[in-house]
Each structure stands twice: as structure tokens, then as C-alpha cells.
Amino acid sequence: MAAAEKSKARRKDPERRAMIRRLITFAVAGTIVLAIAVFAYFLPFRDLLPAVKIPARGENEMRVHFIDVGEGDATLVEFADGDCLLIDGGDGSFVHTEKLIRYLRGIDMHALTVVATHSDADHCGGIADVLEKFGAQKLYLPVLSAETGVYFRMTEAAEEKGITTETLTRYDTIVSDTGAYAVCLSPYSVDEESENDSSALLYLDYEGVRFLFGADISSVRERRLMREYALDPTLFDSGNYTVDLSGIDILRVSHHGSSSSSASEWLELLDADVAVISCGQGNIYAHPSEEAVGRLAATCGEIYRIDELGDIIVTVSGGTYTARRLSSF
């Protein structure tokens, strides 16, 4: 009987040793996971990713970066003194937000101001992460809020960071010490109800080079603005900050090139030299539409599609500009 018990004990020994090895393996793995979690808490994963390599800005240059964030909008205005204005922050997806953070890390950025032109996720989705990472002097909000997680997260991030917020409407002006200024042309007031047409339309001027950022306005709003401008070309001026829509240099095309935007009459008025379409490869909306592209081709000098070209940088210096793909630098 004793011999049988010894034989049984010997059979159990390998099982016991295997179980101990498994327990040790689990313990080591758990320790590693815990260490990674603690490390990631104090040093977020995005800080380990390399910044996008962006050439240094030249003296007295202003640059406008149209950042590839897929089917969304994110435009960075880099003023000549290093202050920056971020217009929208992409859709908030992991890939696009990490891209935006890495891009901003590649800029020698001083103070930051942020504009959310629209409450849709493809415009404000990544702004909370930007505020948490870089802070901001001010966050401009759209007139219509949204009952969505990304919108609440954006406003909560601003509150936690002590960032001043303000609703952006017509004649509100963002002024740079360099002489550059941005004027809001639309929406008219905080009482608007159309989600797309209440998105913020911004006009930017530096050394006479003029940009228009179309947000998501439709052809309905475009035609209304056009009729007002026809009645009085000074109607959109904000004090001493003039707005000249007849002959825009760079147009950020409305609503990702949707067929419901970019009316022919509006494009003829703007007569843009360069049109930039912010859209994602193979997006489910089929942006840009063939109709909008056809209307743009008939009125604009060049069309730059972010889904085909990637990040685009427009450099303004001495009253002239150049538009190039980031990858071509």
C-alpha cells in the first residue's frame, strides 16, 4: 500500500510542478501588464509615437496645414509668430486622432486657439484629445451643440483645463499679432437651427492672401451669402478687418465636396485659385461628388484632394503663396 501511494505521489509531482509553472507564468504576465498600464498612465502611448516630420517655418511665413484625417476636417493655421489656430479636429477615431496629435507635435507651436466649426463628430471628434495634450487659450464652439459623447468630452476637457469657451457667430474675429485675421461670416446668430448651415464659415487674410474655410454649409447658405454680398460687398467687414470674397486664393471646399454644396454661382463669385477637398479614401458618402468636382473644375485653377494627395501645406510669404504636398518637401 505504501509503495502504491509513493507511485501516486510521484505521478502528481509533474502535475504540481506544471501548475506551479503556470501560476508563475500568469504572475509574471500580470506584472508585465500592470507595469505597462502604469507606464501608459504616466506616459500615454501617443507620446511614444514619432512626431510628423514637418519642415521648419521660415521667417515671417504663415502656413496653413490641411491635415489628412480621413473623412473629416482638421486645418491648422500656423501664424508667423508661432501661435496657431486649429480649425476642427477630425473624427475622434484612434488612427486619425493619433495622426493629428503627431502632426501638432511636429510644429514649433506656441499658443493655441481651437475652433469647432460643427458639432458633428467628423469635425470635433479629436478636439478633446488636443485640449488634453496641448491646452488652448480659447475654444470656439458651434452655435448648435450635440447630445453626443465626443461633444460632451470636448466641452468637459475645456472645463477641466480651464479653457475659455465662446460661441462663434458672424463678425467674431480672431486676430494675430502678425497682422493675420480670421472673420466669421456665418452663422448669423446663436438661434440658427440647421446643423450644416449653422457651421462656422471662416475667412482668413494674411498679407492680402485670402482663404475661405467652408465647413459644412450647403448651397442654400452659399446662395444667401452671395445675395448679401451682391447688395453690399462691405457687409461682411468686421470693423477695420475687411472681407473680400471676389477672388479667393485658397478655398477649403464645403462639406467634403458634397453634391449639396459648392453651387456654381458661389464658386464663380469666389473664383478660387486653389480648392482643397477634405475627404477620406473610399468613404461611404462617395465624397467628393462628381457634380461638385465638375463645378469646381469649371471655376477653380487647381483642385487638391486630400484623399489622393495626403497632407497639404500652403505657405504665405511676401503677399504670395505656394501650395505643396507635405511629402514633396
Image (tube, rainbow, N blue to C red):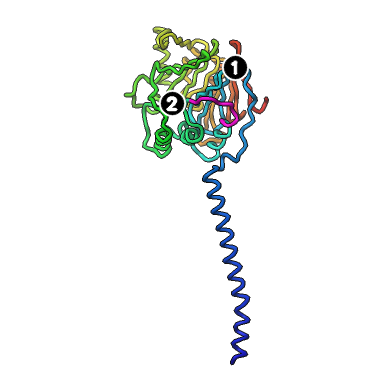
Of residues 275 and 295, the one drawn nearer to the viewer in this rendering: 275
First in sequence: mark 2 vs mark 1: 1
Of residues 290 and 280, the one drawn nearer to the viewer in this rendering: 280
Q: Residue at x 52, y 30 (%)?
A: 287
- Count of residue discs: 2
Q: Is residue 24 above or below residue 188?
A: below
Q: Residue at x 45, y 10 (%)?
A: 241
Residue 249: where, in percent of width, then height? 55, 14
117 left or right, relative to 62:
left
Q: Amino acid at mark 1?
A: Glu
Placement of the N terminus among the 4 image quadrants: bottom right
Work out whether residue 162 can be spotted: yes
Q: Which residues are magenta?
A: 104-112
Placement of the C terminus among the 4 image quadrants: top right
Residue under circle 1? 61
Residue 269: where, in percent of width, then height? 48, 12
Of residues 182 and 201, the one drawn nearer to the viewer in this rendering: 182
Of residues 77 and 276, the one drawn nearer to the viewer in this rendering: 77
Callouts 2 and 1 close, C-beta under 8 Å: no
Mark 2 lies on a secondary structure that is strand
250 left or right, relative to 164:
right
CA gap, disc 2 and disc 1: 23 Å
Q: Is residue 23 above or below residue 137?
A: below
Residue 271 falls within the magenta-colored stretch: no
Q: Residue furthest right?
A: 329
Residue 146: where, in percent of width, then height? 37, 34
Residue 108 falls within the magenta-colored stretch: yes
Residue under circle 2? 138
Q: Is residue 70 above or below residue 29?
A: above
Main SS type for the magenta part?
loop
